[in-house]
Structure formats: C-alpha cells, structure tokens
DNA sequence: CCGCACAACTTGTCACTGTCAAGATAAGGG
DNA sequence: CCCTTATCTTGACAGTGACAAGTTGTGCGG
C-alpha cells in the first residue's frame, strides 16, 4: 500500500499524466482544466507547474505520449495483417482510425488543437516518428510524395470525421463491415499497383 | 456617419458577429473570449448575452454563417469549372480546401470543436445543406454512400491537414501546382467512371 | 549521526474569464 | 405625454492559469 498521503508524492509526474488523460477523455480539449487535473491527482493547484511548467507543457507531454500510442495502434493492426507492403499500409490506415475512435479527445489534441507545443523536442520527435512511418510505408509500395499526401489525407479525413460522429452511414456499421468499407476507401488513395 | 456612440447600438448583433469573426481569426478557437469580443465591438461585457445568450450561442451563430460561406467557396469554384458532374464535384473539393485555408479558425470551429451547438436548428440546417450538396454531387456521378464517404474524407483530410500546416510538401507549392496535385488526389477518391 | 542545501509541494494572490442579477437608458405605442 | 419593453451597463461571483513566497521532506557531505 503505497498510496498513503505523503508530502512528496513519489511519482507525481506520472500520476499527473494519468489524471490529465482521464480529464481529457471526460471533458475534452476545450474543457480541460489544470486545476481539475491537480484535484484528481489529490494535489495542490500549483503542483503541476513544478513538473510541467505550464498547462501547455502538460498537454504537450500528453500529446507526445499520444503519438507513441498512435504508432502502437498501427503496429497492432500491422501485426495481424499480411506481410506484403500494401496490406501493411492498409493496416496502418485502419490503425489510424482505430486510434481516433478509441481516444477522440487525445486525437483532437494531437491533430486539431494549438494547446500542445509542437516546437517541443519530445513532441516533435514523436510526431516525426509517426510521419516517418507513413513515408516509409508509402515508399515500400513505390509511392512518391503525392501518394503519401493522398494516403495520409484519406486516412486522416476518415479518422477525423468518424471520431467527430459525422459520417453516420459508416459509423453505424458493425466493426467487420466498417473495416471492409474503410479498406475499400483507403485503397483508392493508393497509387496504382506496379504490375 | 452612423458610428457615433449611442446607448442603443442599432445593429449590435451583426457588429458582434463581425467582431467575433475577427477575434476568432486572430486568437483561434482556443483563445476566443466573449469579453474580448465585446471590447472590440465597443460595448459592455454583458451585452452579447442579450443577443446570443451564451458564448456558445455566439459561436454557434458564427459556425452557421461559416457553413454558408463554405458553400459559397465551393460555388465559386464550381462556377469556374466545366459543367459535367465530375468536374463539378472536383471543384467542390477544391473549394472545400480553399475555405479551410482562407479561414482556418472558422474551419476548426465548424469541424473540430465542441464549442458550437450542433443541435441548434440554424446550425443544423446550414451544415445539412453542405452535406446535402455533397450527396447530390456524388449521386450525379452515379456514386453510392461509400463513394460519398470516400470523397468527403479525402477532401476533409486534405483541408484539415493543409490548414493545420502539416502536409508541408503540398503546402509549399504555388497555387496552380497545388490545385493540380489536389485534383489528382481528389480524383482518386471518385468511383470509377461509368464508361 | 548531523546539518544543510535543494527538490517537491502548498498557500496566497493576481488578472482574467463566463454567467447571472439588478439597475440605467432609450424607443415606440397607447 | 406616459409607460411598457427591449436594449445596454454595472456589479458581483466562482472558476481559471500563472506567479511569488512559504513549508516540508530527502539525501548528500562531513
């Protein structure tokens, strides 16, 4: 039982990140409050500043963590897909949507918000890793920069609209049927097969 | 000279909408402040409540107006395009992107925010009109619901990523070159031609 | 084993925000 | 001409993020 109240928390940084993620999920990016996060972590309102400087600092750390989970969601799909490059790229696109649906608020923080500081080295590295993953996959199927833009835009548009609850025709489908429809749509954005 | 200071403004509602739009453009959705809007309109901090009830009410009206301009941006492109349905749909897609690039903050309010009340009848009607326009155009080229989702997602993804300053390869191009690249990408999302 | 320097956290305050209640002012109809 | 009513202002309250100054614990050098 390490959860007795001590003056020095022990691992407040991690606890704040957890609390912040929960707050983000419950209240959304717009309703996010630093003091509320502190309350949830059972700590004074000024405690977060010592670990994250700013509300922006906390959200930046959260966004960086988000990009790692984003890549993990794609990797999970890729592991279950056929090993050929096209199937892998398709799996990455499905993982993109998976992530947006599973964590809509985090997704919005990462892609539709100015509340994270993208000049921060950690966040920059994390988002660059995601971008690099996409570029490598597009290169593996013989695509160029335009192809990358097409694939990315298509996956991103699907993810953003679905997680926002628009695209109701697609949102109402079962998981399998939706995967099928998404796959058909995503494949359109691919460059024509080499053969 | 009607801009002398009177107790009764005359058309405060319109003035507040203008001020709100300017504030939105300058500070973004996150930094939007009702009191700042009132200051910009030269009026007391509680004046907006009488016309819009809420901050949410003001942003809702702004979003509804945004959807009308959104359709206007598409119409402008459509008027300059060939009359056949495929060219018209492509033009609508380019207008989609035009709008997002011209008014990024408004675009984010309309598509990536919870600060507008989408159960409001005016906003609902305005956004439905935009949705209906898309559906009609997709139907005109013989497409079904999946095709509509594909086209919409592709256009939306391009618009969102470009207006957020990602997709740097595309963002650096000249207007003509970018239109060309965008057209190529958008066309991929169309269903195969009938012939 | 001691004391001291520093890190971790708290308390208090400031300017700012959105919302509500109550008052002041003007416009227009009887 | 008065009086009702819409319009706008003033004042207040709780909540927010940021800062400054205190308080408490931890661990290091001796």
Image: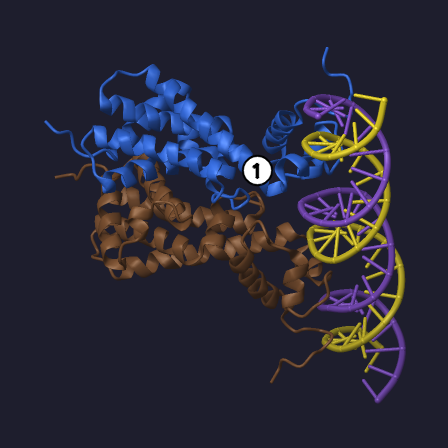
Chain colours: A brown, B blue, C purple, D yellow
Q: Nearer the viewer, residue B121 or B65?
A: B121
Indicate the quadrant where residue C2 lies.
bottom right
Category of crowding for the residue at label 1, using alpha-carbon neighbours closer than 10 angstroms: few (below 14), some (14–19), many (at least 20): many
Q: Is residue C3 left or right of residue B75?
A: right
Q: Position of residue D20 (x, y in %)?
A: 85, 53
Between B115 and A51, which is closer to the camera in this rendering? Answer: B115
- Res. A42 visible in picture: yes
| Residue at left offset 26%, top offset 22% | B87
Q: Reply above or below: A174 against A114.
A: below
Per the image, the residue denoted by label 1 is B59
- Asked if residue A3 lies left or right of residue B162, the reply is right
Name the residue at 72% across, 14% down.
B2
x and y, in percent, of residue C6 in the image: 78, 65
User: Nearest the camera: B92 or A191?
Assistant: B92
Element marked by disc 1? helix
Question: Is residue A164 positioned above or below A10 on the image?
Answer: above
The C terminus of chain A appears in which quarter of the rendering? top left
Query: A47 above or below B90?
Result: below
């Amino acid at each position: 039982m390490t959860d007795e109240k001590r003056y020095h928390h022990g691992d407040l940084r991690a606890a704040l990140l957890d609390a912040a993620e929960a707050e983000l999920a419950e209240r959304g990016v717009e309703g996010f409050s630093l003091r509320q996060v502190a309350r949830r972590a059972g700590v004074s309102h000024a405690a977060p500043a010592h670990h994250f400087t700013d509300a922006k600092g906390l959200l930046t750390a959260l966004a960086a963590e988000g990009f790692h989970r984003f890549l993990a969601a794609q990797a999970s799909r890729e592991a279950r897909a056929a090993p050929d490059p096209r199937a892998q790229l398709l799996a990455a696109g499905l993982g993109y949507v998976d992530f947006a649906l599973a964590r809509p608020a985090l997704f919005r923080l990462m892609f539709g918000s100015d509340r994270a500081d993208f000049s921060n080295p950690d966040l920059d590295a994390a988002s660059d890793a995601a971008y690099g993953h996409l570029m490598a996959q597009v290169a593996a199927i013989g695509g160029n920069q335009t192809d990358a833009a097409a694939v990315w835009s298509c996956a991103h548009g699907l993810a953003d609209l679905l997680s926002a609850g628009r695209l109701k025709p697609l949102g109402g489908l079962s998981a399998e049927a939706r995967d099928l429809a998404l796959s058909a749509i995503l494949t359109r954005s691919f460059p024509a097969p080499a053969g």
